[in-house]
Image: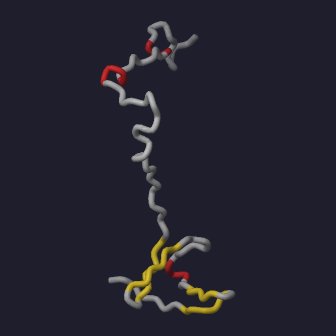
Amino acid sequence: MAKEYRAKVFKSGNSVALRLPKALGIVEGAEMTVREDRGSFIVEPYSPKPKKIDLTGIYGSIPGLKLLDREDRMFEPSPRPWDDPSWPGPSDPQ
């Protein structure tokens, strides 16, 4: 069952503020979202929604831009030093 706390509303400049009890563990400066639902207020921690980029208008707007064929997406991996048998490993003395 959820705990219930009593909070006090007070004037802060030209606005009103809600003083929340320390027992809630909310840190100073934390951003909160406040929603009003049929006369009740819901206060929740603010979590930004991930930004999405709309690319629907870009398709066809750049001449010469085309989808890659399957063969064009394949690549040969580049050689790595540790794949060379003569490469001294971390435990090999030089």
Relative to 57, residue 38 above or below: below
| Observer-nearest of 13 and 27 | 13
- Quadrant of the drawing holding the C terminus: top right
Relative to 14, residue 30 above or below: above
Farthest residue, direction left: 70
- Quadrant of the drawing holding the N terminus: bottom left
In the shown orientation, is residue 80 left or right of residue 9? left
Relative to 24, residue 75 above or below: above
Farthest residue, direction top: 86
Render colour scheme: secondary structure
**Where residue 91 sits in the image (x, y, percent)?**
50, 18
The residue sitting at 54% across, 85% down in the picture is 21
| Observer-nearest of 52 and 66 | 66
Picture mark count: 0
| Observer-nearest of 22 and 55 | 55
Classify residue 63 by image quadrant: top left
The residue sitting at 50% across, 11% down in the picture is 87
**Where residue 77 sits in the image (x, y, percent)?**
41, 18
The residue sitting at 60% across, 89% down in the picture is 16
In the shown orientation, is residue 44 left or right of residue 21? left
Relative to 85, residue 42 above or below: below
The residue sitting at 54% across, 84% down in the picture is 20
**Where residue 62 sits in the image (x, y, percent)?**
46, 34
**Where residue 69 sits in the image (x, y, percent)?**
32, 24
